[in-house]
Image (cartoon, grey):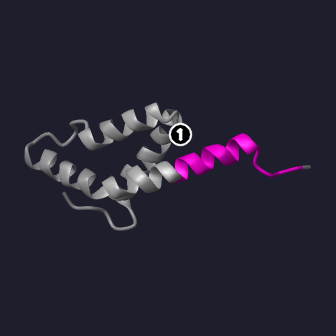
Amino acid sequence: MDFNYSPRTIELQNRLRAFMDENVYPAETAVLDELRANAAAGKRWAPVQVIERLKSKARDAGLQVVMDACMRATHRRLMIGPKPIVL
C-alpha cells in the first residue's frame, strides 16, 4: 500500500505553510492585542478583525476551509496552552 500524500495534498500543504508563515504567525501579536482591547472594552466575544481579514485572505487564496481549522487551533493555543494568555 502507498501511504504517501497525493500530489494535491502536498501542494495544499505547501500553500498552507507559506500562508501561515507570511500571514498568520506574524499576526499573532496583533490578535492578542485586539483580544485584550476587546476584553478591556467589555467586548470579549466580539469578532477579532485581524482574524476576519486573515479569513478573507485565505478565501482569496483558496484556503478557507483549511484556514478555519488552523485559526481555531491558533486561537486555542493562544488561549489555553501551554501557558494561557491572561487578558
Residue 48 visible in rendering: no
The spot of residue 12 in percent (x, y) is: 62, 43
Q: Residue furthest right?
A: 1
Left or right of 16 in this view: 47: left
Q: Residue at x 19, y 49 (%)?
A: 34
Question: Is residue 49 depicted above or below 16 in this figure?
Answer: above
Left or right of 12 in this view: 84: left
Secondary structure state at the residue bearing disc 1? helix
Q: Residue at x 49, y 36 (%)?
A: 61
Q: Which residue is mark 1?
A: 66
Q: Residue furthest left?
A: 41
The spot of residue 22 in percent (x, y) is: 42, 53
Q: Which quadrant is home to the C terminus?
A: bottom left
Image quarter for residue 80? bottom left
Left or right of 59 in this view: 11: right
**Magenta portion: prevailing SS class:** helix
Q: Residue furthest bottom?
A: 83
6, 79: nearer the viewer: 6
Question: Is residue 2 depicted above or below 85 in this figure?
Answer: above
Q: Which residues are magenta?
A: 2-17
Q: Residue at x 31, y 37 (%)?
A: 53
Residue 10 visible in rendering: yes
Report the number of discs: 1
Left or right of 44 in this view: 79: right
The spot of residue 58 in percent (x, y) is: 44, 37
* In the image, residue 34 lies in the stretch drawn in magenta: no
Q: Residue at x 48, y 34 (%)?
A: 64
39, 12: nearer the viewer: 12
* In the image, residue 6 lies in the stretch drawn in magenta: yes
Question: Is residue 42 depicted above or below 3 in this figure?
Answer: above
User: Hey, what amino acid is under mark 1?
Assistant: Val
Q: Residues within 10 Å of mark 1 (few under 14, many from 20)?
A: some
